[in-house]
Amino acid sequence: MAETKWRVTVDTDLCIGSGGCVLRAPDAFELDTARQSCPKHEVMAPSDDVLEAAETCPVEAITIVEEGSGAEVFPPAD
């Protein structure tokens, strides 16, 4: 059975550059020259730090889906 991977994206139209994601998951996020958050890797192993970064983003700009299945990890499906 294949190991689960997450596809992490940041909506740059929503991102306000607070940097909270970088503080919570520095291995997964960085701020670009426009102070917008961007994932360091498009696909990554599941991580509590990455999930916490998404959950605490003040504008909910971070989306996490399971690679392959497309199942929503965050934000949760309604």
Image (cartoon, rainbow, N blue to C red):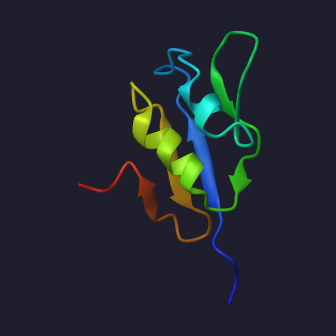
For the residue pair 71 and 25, the one nearer the viewer reads as 25
Residue 2: percent from the left, percent from the top?
Answer: 70, 83
In the current view of this chain or complex, which residue is farthest to the front? 23
Up-down: is 17 above or below 42? above
Instruction: Assign the N terminus to one quadrant of the image.
Output: bottom right
Identity of the residue drawn at 54% across and 71% down: 69
Q: Residue at x 46, y 21 (%)?
A: 14
Point out the image quarter for the C terminus.
bottom left
Residue at the extreme top = 34
Horizontal side, residue 67 vs residue 58: left or right: right
Residue 57 location in percent, x, y?
Answer: 44, 31
Q: Where in the figure is residue 58, as x and y percent of width and height?
A: 39, 25
Total numbered labels: 0
33 vs 28: above or below: above
Query: Of all residues shown, which one is farthest toward the bottom?
Result: 1
Identify the residue shown where x is 59% and y is 21%: 19
Q: In the figure, is residue 48 to the left or right of 34? A: left
Name which residue lies at 56% across and 23% down: 12
Q: Is 30 above or below relative to 3? A: above
Residue 4 falls in image quadrant: bottom right
Q: Is residue 61 left or right of residue 17?
A: left
